[in-house]
Amino acid sequence: MENTLDPADLQAVWLTLKLASVTTVLLLCIATPLAWWLSHSRKWYKGPVAALVALPLVLPPTVLGFYLLLLMGPHGLVGELTSALHLGRLPFSFAGLVVGSVLFSMPFAVQPIQNAFEAIGKRPLEVAATLRASAWDRFFSVALPLARPGFLTAIILAFAHTVGEFGVVLMLGGNISGETRVLSVAIYNHVEAMEYGAAHLLAGGMVLFSFMVLLGLYLAGGKLSQVSK
Amino acid sequence: MNVIHSMDIRAHFKMQLDSFMLDAAFNAPSVGVTALFGPSGSGKTTLLRCIAGLERAAGTLHVHGEVWQDDVRSLPTHKRRLGYVFQEASLFPHLSVRANLEYGLKRIPLVERKVQLEHVVEWLGLSHLIGRGDPASLSGGERQRVAMGRALLTSPRLLLMDEPLSALDTASKQEILPYLERLHRELEIPVLYVSHSLDEVARLADHLVAMEKGRVIANGALNEVLVRPDLPLANFDDAGAVIEAVVGQQDPTYNLTQLDFSGGSLWVGQVKQPSGNRVRVRVLARDVSIATQLPQGSSITNILPARIAGIHCESSDKVNISMTVGESQVLLSRITRRSLDLLGITVGMHVFAQVKSVALMA
């Protein structure tokens, strides 16, 4: 039984953190305008869009991964586009994992931010408008600071959810060391190879990490709600 | 083009509301306080929001010769040089009291800054509040004063106030009213003041726009509109005339003060102000009775010769009557229909108005 981590395991840890960080940053850029639109729009297609965003919450990750694989594969719409742009193929690459993770963790970023925007209500933004603040100014000087707790939740959930991802990665990225082999896949490999000691180290680390993240979330949440009272 | 006319505020808005159509047009002078008065749900707040550009409605709006909205274009709210005080203070919870006050101030060009922070702090008594970090630690009245200051600091060309006292308890109201009266006297910014309280209107306004079901039913100088016997306003329990008077002689023996106005003078309970000071008093319709001859042996001190100007039957038993006292002052009186018939009161008749009580407003 192997009880220590080999360099490939450390690489998997590093890759996982990189994937989660890139995904979280991208998600903030996408989820913020999307959440703003969802919280303010009265269009009929707001409902379908909201449902689409929430879909990864209920879909098995393998289903999402399967369709993404088809879409990004050589005969898929996205695959043809990336080939035409000489970007290569997304499946079995780090970029492919990022695309999958962004979609998979989307509801965890959009929903807390959307809730935070909705909780602000119209009034503070109207007040800001009567105080000469333009739409962008209102967004940055009023909406963003007031939605801070929602952003904090979104960042933590999106990051943690991406770290824990398994199904989508396996469908999309396979198991290429240093490119697509993330922590959860590495644990799976160790278990398959009966290397329970190494699996314990990685899995235990994940448990500790997840606990710390949630603890941080609750502590920060408590502190934030005290400030707003 | 009439120059004076172009400097005032002209508004006309049309908008479908839940149960009726808002179709309101009015002119307001470019000085003083204009009250938008009407019962709850008459569309006055919506009208104010249209003026601020917070509601999208078809219409036209001219403010001091500037076009804020017409058929072709409509300035967005942040480009209209207005101040808006909402019913609830709505201070930004993430900013300190000072940052709240300076939020609008920072966003206007230096040349437009006519209202200084120090002045606002002094006018509104904010010196002990400006250092506070969390606006939630302020009382309701204090928060509303900060909100007023915040709006004033944008040096608005028009100040809109949407029932700024209605969310406050009586004590906080009494705390704020003097500040409002002071702003009214010392600032040259015209104010549109939405209210459903006749008492507030009588204290603060100079001009009155009365609304009902989305329409403007009367628009004119405060003391002209308030004494029109045919308006629904005259049926309010506290309907009555407003008189601008000057403090006259004192009677130290009986602790009374004489107030002089264009129609004569009134004796009231002692007013501790130097003679010559201007005061505003209210004479309620229910406190004015009518005698066809000068009453003898009456306990009522204030009896004024008057001439009947208008009669309006408000119900099967009560009548509202307006009377001219002196040159231009009009009083409103509410009497029973039987008294009207017994005394044979007709328009143009010379009578005596007996004023039972006079309320000093400031």
Image (cartoon, rainbow, N blue to C red):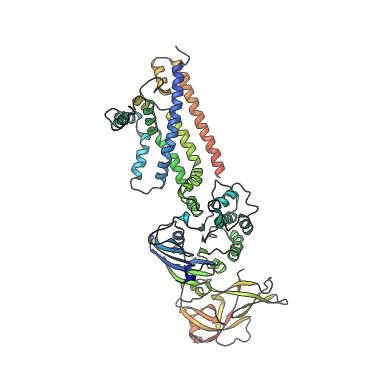
Residue B215 visible from this viewpoint: yes
Q: Is residue A172 above or below residue B336?
A: above
Closer-to-camera residue (B168/B177): B177
Closer-to-camera residue (B145/A80): A80
User: Relative to A4, is B298 on the left or the right?
Assistant: right
The C terminus of chain B is located in which quarter? bottom right
* Residue projecting furthest to the top: A1
Closer-to-camera residue (A154/B158): B158
Q: Where residue A94 sits: x, y (%)? A: 39, 26
Q: Where residue B306 sits: x, y (%)? A: 55, 83
The N terminus of chain B is located in which quarter? bottom left
Residue drawn at 38 percent across, 20 percent down: A176
Count up the numbered dots. Answer: 0
Q: Where residue B166 sits: x, y (%)? A: 53, 60
Residue drawn at 51 percent across, 46 percent down: A141
User: Relative to B128, is B89 on the left or the right?
Assistant: left
Residue drawn at 50 percent across, 40 percent down: A149
Q: Where residue B269 sits: x, y (%)? A: 66, 74
